[in-house]
Amino acid sequence: MTAPADADAGLPEPVPSRVGVSQPVPLGGSPQPHVPVGTGETENLRGQHAGFASRFIAFIVDCAVSIGVFMLVLGAASFAASVLTGTSIHWSRANTWVVVAFFAWEFFYYAYFWTASGKTPGMVLLGVQVVGQDGTSVGTKRGLLRTLAFPLSFLLLGLGFLGILLGRDRRALHDVIADTAVVYCWDAREARLRSLAREGGNRQP
Amino acid sequence: MYPGDGVRRSAARRVTEQVESIAQGVAQRVIDLVVESLDMNALIAKIDLNVVLGRVDLNEVVDRIDLNQIVDQLDVNRLMARVDINQIVSQIDIEALVKNTDLGAIMVSSSSSLATEAVDQGRSHAVSMDDTLARWVSRIRRNRVGRAEPPELPNTPEEP
């Protein structure tokens, strides 16, 4: 992965303080791995409301993971059936049971991860986490409610996600319903130190 | 000066020398007897070393020592040749060391892999995009909407 093209050619202007998130800049103005740092000193993003891009990418990763696992399970079931009974099963999207199983699996996937830790695998990768609006753990009740309300944001032609872009605290419709928020949970300062350590390690003969 | 003065002086000198010799012999013998009769262990036991050390100004002693001179006189290679490193290392409780110090964290961080680097970069780019989007929205809305205070995170371990 390389730094974006605009990283070298002048930095974006500092983010207004009201936006509330730090401004990533490349390290040393060179095409090195860049980690978010503040305009003055490196800021820790931990606890700040996560933005649309981080959440969307995390969702895409979760889709890939959950659908991939579902397909694997279907494939394994088909293989097991062909070995045991000698007849192969061809799964179809038109099959009601497949559709029901898919939605049940998706519900389980999100409900389990959100209630257990507030983080799905995609969210872990992107360093974001679901917490209660008061900052406490999501818990079972809010996790299940969020999972149930999640499809609503899609069903309203995606308007449920507008809150992430336009709202003060970047909450989608399902966040408002479940009284949750999504925040960054990775330490940008540590990432910067790691980057500097790698840089120093690479310089050594 | 009387004629018998020289004889008298000579006799007095001889007597004095003999007396001094006898006195020295007696003193030597007395010292030997005293030293022999002394119980050094009992004497040392009576000495309060703390009091003695309390009177010693160690800083002054250390100031007087020229460490550079001492170090210059040391043959480090010879010294190191005598040290059995394997024995020292075998006596170290590595597990306790890792458990009780930041050594484990240092080892983990120093062995951060390419995967960690890629994750850091990915997250960084995502945050960059978040900021860009937030700036666009902020311009479109002419900064009418501020950001809410972030919530306090629960006490969960941080992501690497």
Image: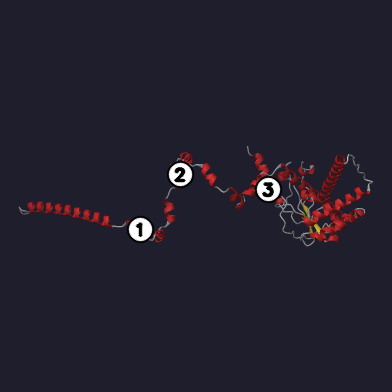
Q: Which residue is mark 2?
A: B71
Q: Amino acid at mark 3?
A: Leu
- Which secondary structure lies at badge 2? helix
Query: Is A162 positioned to the left or the right of B109 in the image?
Result: right
Nearer the viewer's eye, disc 3 or disc 1? 1
Residue B44 disc label:
1
Q: Amino acid at mark 1?
A: Ile
Up-down relation of residue B38 to residue B108 (above or below): below
Residue B61 image offset from top left, x and y in percent: 42, 53
Nearer the viewer's eye, disc 2 or disc 1? 1
Task: Please tell me which residue lies in front, A100 or B152.
Answer: A100
Task: Please tell me which residue lies in front, B140 or A73.
Answer: A73
Subunit that carries the residue with mark 1: B
Residue A16 image offset from top left, x and y in percent: 79, 55
Same chain, marks 2 and 3? Answer: no
- Which secondary structure lies at badge 1? helix
**Quadrant, the N terminus of chain A:** top right
Figure disc tally? 3
Q: Which residue is mark 3?
A: A193
Same chain, marks 2 and 1? Answer: yes
Query: Is A201 positioned to the left or the right of B44 in the image?
Result: right
Q: Residue furthest top?
A: A205
